[in-house]
Amino acid sequence: MLPEVGNFSLILSLFFAGSLAIVPITGYWRHNPILLSTARPLTLLMSCFVLVSFIVLAIAFLTNDFSVLYVSLNSNSNLPIWYKFSAIWGSHEGSLLLWVLILCGWSTAVALKSHTLPKEVGPIVLSVLGMVATGFLLFMLFTSSPFVRDLPNVPANGEDLNPLLQDVGLVIHPPMLYMGYVGFSVAFAFAIAALITGNLNSSWARWARPWTAVSWAFLTLGITLGSWWAYYELGWGGWWFWDPVENASLMPWLAGTALIHSLAVTEKRGVFKSWTVLLAIFTFSLSLLGTFLVRSGVLTSVHAFAADPTRGVFILALLIVLIGSSLLLYSLRASQVKAGVAFGLTGREAWLLLNNIILTVLTLTVLLGTLYPLLFEALDLGRISVGAPYFNTVFSPLALLLMVFMAIGPLSKWHNTKPSLLVRLCVWPGVVSILLAGVISYAYHLGGMAWLSLSVAFLVVLLTCKDWFLKVSSGSKGIIPRARQLPRNYYGMMLAHLGLVVSLIGILMVSTCSEETTVKIAAGQTVSFAGYQFTLNQFESLKGPNYVADQADIAVYQDGKLVAQLKPEKRFYEARRQVMTEASLNAGITRDLYVSLGEKLDDQAWSMRIYVKAFVRWIWFGGILMVCGGVLSALDKRYRTRVEGRHA
Amino acid sequence: MIDAVIFRRLMKLIVWLVLSYTAYGQAEELMTFSSPVNQTRYDALVKELRCPKCQNQDIADSGSGIAKDLRHKIHDMIENGQSDKEIVDYMVARYGDFVLYRPKHNAATFALWYGPFILLGVGLVIFAVVIIRNRLRRKGETI
Amino acid sequence: MRKVIFFIPLVVFIALGIVFYLQLGKNPEYMPSALVGKPVPKIHLVSLDTDQVVTNVELPKGPYLINFWGTWCPTCAIEHPYLMRLEKQGVPIIGIDYKDDKASAEQWLRNKGNPYKMVLLDELGNFGVNMGVTGAPETFVINSKGIIVYRHQGAVDDVAWKTIQGYMQ
């Protein structure tokens, strides 16, 4: 009975979403304030009913209701309770429900904040969000309802959640990622509202900025978590694979990064107006494209959901209607925009324009690499693969170039900066960075690429600190009062830039200084590798809630001192008859010790893989810094002031 | 006690059964090389080649049977003194261009390899145009 | 001219949409063999029936199939009855016992029947690699000139046989 309630509740929310998509916007065209005012209650009703559906599905999982097909395919009565909950988004149907739920969450947040917006803007923004929700609710109800029953042949037990997904990282990774993806729909809705009303001045950028920063922070967190999860769960210590599904999350991130910067310029200086609107559409389109790629079965990926052509056709139609109509609206309206104030070659506007150009090129590079095999096949040229070696070759130099601009840009002033001033500011930090990086690269035999990357990293750090110091040391007040006066926005930027540098150092070190080996080892034996001694004490057989495992107990010594106790496992999940390698690791600031069990070679000995991963933590620590930066800049005081009256 | 023994044997059997066609796993076998250079060449090659059977994994990381066979093949070919190019050509002749994670440079992949740099060039041209037009407009404003 | 620029994103997007539409419903795991259009690679394998080394000269003259199988492979067990039916229809099939051992192969053929004109042992899978095989079962169609014209991955069934038959003419 309950699952039918869930389904019915979805139908009701579709009704409200459909009304939300039509009524307020009609109110705008007919100048009818009553119709406009329906936006808020409709949003809240739509969100409530989606929430009810979600709770119903959660209850079905927690009570082991295997009469629901989706539950029986993705859960098992032996599954630990927290994985039963996360199994809701373990597969296509449920994750789509989560997607819609998060969209409703964002819409509700906009609805609750809409009193700070001019009277017509809020309802139109909500209406656009309602259109997106309508599309996805239709998609869910017609092709992928999670409430389909498998009556009358109800299985006694479920088929269990994919073991790869039975992990803490996967409990929180998808919700964070979706918060980011879907959050860009708010910036998108603001941009579309600006196109509809024709008010393409800087005010929409001001409203969209905090929403974009928060979504970006969520997406960054989602990607960071995903990378961290892949690192310890997939069992071979990789942290980024350039897999199409990873690329699908990287593209909106890159475009979103460009959008954050471009919104800043549009808000403060009123330039790049039509470009920023396009970028907002582009960013959300890439989020939708990711959804399409993962769910339509056009690409092969380790992470893709099971493919179904009807779903593919539906979601493609949805994509074409949503993105196509936005782009059409854009091409009709954006040409009316007048250029804003002028700026010079070394003004901050120019630096941010460069930033946007390179970020766009980076986004398109990832898009090109991801879709090239598809284009190739569509033109009947055969099948090719584009993988990590391609991306590392093409992406890295462009990304380094971006970081050079990222170092210098913040020192410039709006409108125009004297070139001689910029040169004077950059010379010494530049020289110091190159020398310091050179010494380090030479001392540790790191090579030319490392020298270049480290120089860029140091340059960013030095110039960021210098800029801050110049800001706080000028004037009569003391350093601390002045430092406290700087806007949160500024500290947000600092944190995010430094975070990127921390990640860069991590990426560089882990790819140049890591060591790995495969050894044969039996109980009682010791293997020396990379300055560590790995002693295998014993093997044990374990029984988990829904698996059995062989576990090795390894003590790691360095110079005779015990530094770590590692317990890698080989697990066998009964319900899915699947073997999983559970690696064990000892985390450290400058290195991770990472051990995973291979195969049993004979009665006593196993093959074992040992990795010493240099600075790998820095990659995710940098990600966390970027997240903090994003959140901090969204909390800037300026966004909390109420908008007075209507804007012209 | 006996239970434990039976349990363990049963487990061994099951693990063996399943290992024979599971897709998840990684390079597990021991490879010994006559020189460190060969080891380095091997490590690089297995990361450049895609496992022809798997969804999207290189030969190094895949636990599938074919990836294992190909790892052994590459090991043997390296130890037999064959060059990287010979090994890659050998794989392409049997499994097609699909196994190359670094696509060949040719007319069909021109856009893939040079597209990003062409786009960067276009971007810089746009940058120059914007700056020049700005300069012209500022001159107009000051007059 | 200026207005045209703003239509570029729309045009690019529509082109992309068309590509996606063309690719929908295709099996992304389908892999054409790199050996199509090429002769059968050099064979130097021991026959299960005669214990003699077999080379390319002993291969049939007309169109025939090469089927890779193994006793360790569950899909091969599903496929086996279909191969028996093909054998009754007089389709010549060369079986390659892929990465398997002789004793279990003999046992399997005794129990389930032998659909093969000839069974060759590829215990190490070297011939499999030369044929670009990625697993079992896989079936190759060889035409009367000894050229590989088609490869099918997975069990042969009614649907697959229709396609294969087309290539055997």
Image (tube, rainbow, N blue to C red):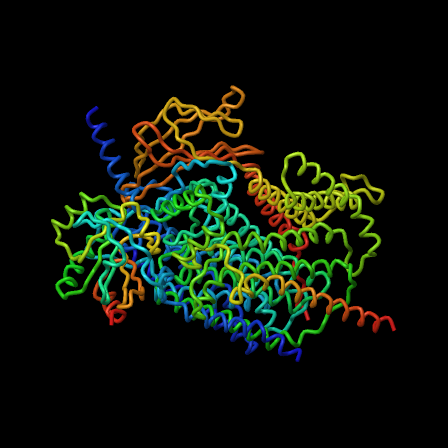
> Image check: B134 left or right of A500?
right
> Which quadrant does the N terminus of chain B fall into?
top left
Measuring from the top left, give residue A426's x and y in whole percent: 78, 48
- Residue at 18 percent of width and 64 percent of height: C91
Viewer-proximal residue among A18 and B15? B15
Q: Nearer the viewer, residue A417 or A200?
A: A417
In the image, A276 versus C141, the foreground residue is C141
Residue A539 seen in render: yes
Residue B4: quadrant of the picture: top left
Q: Quadrant of residue A15?
A: bottom left
Q: Quadrant of the C terminus of chain B?
A: bottom right
C110 displayed left or right of A184: left
Residue furthest to the bottom: C1
A452 displayed left or right of A244: right
C32 shown above or below A523:
below
Is any atom of residue A168 visible in this view? no
Residue A402 picture location, percent across and down: 66, 54
Q: Which quadrant of the figure has residue A439?
A: top right
Total numbered labels = 0
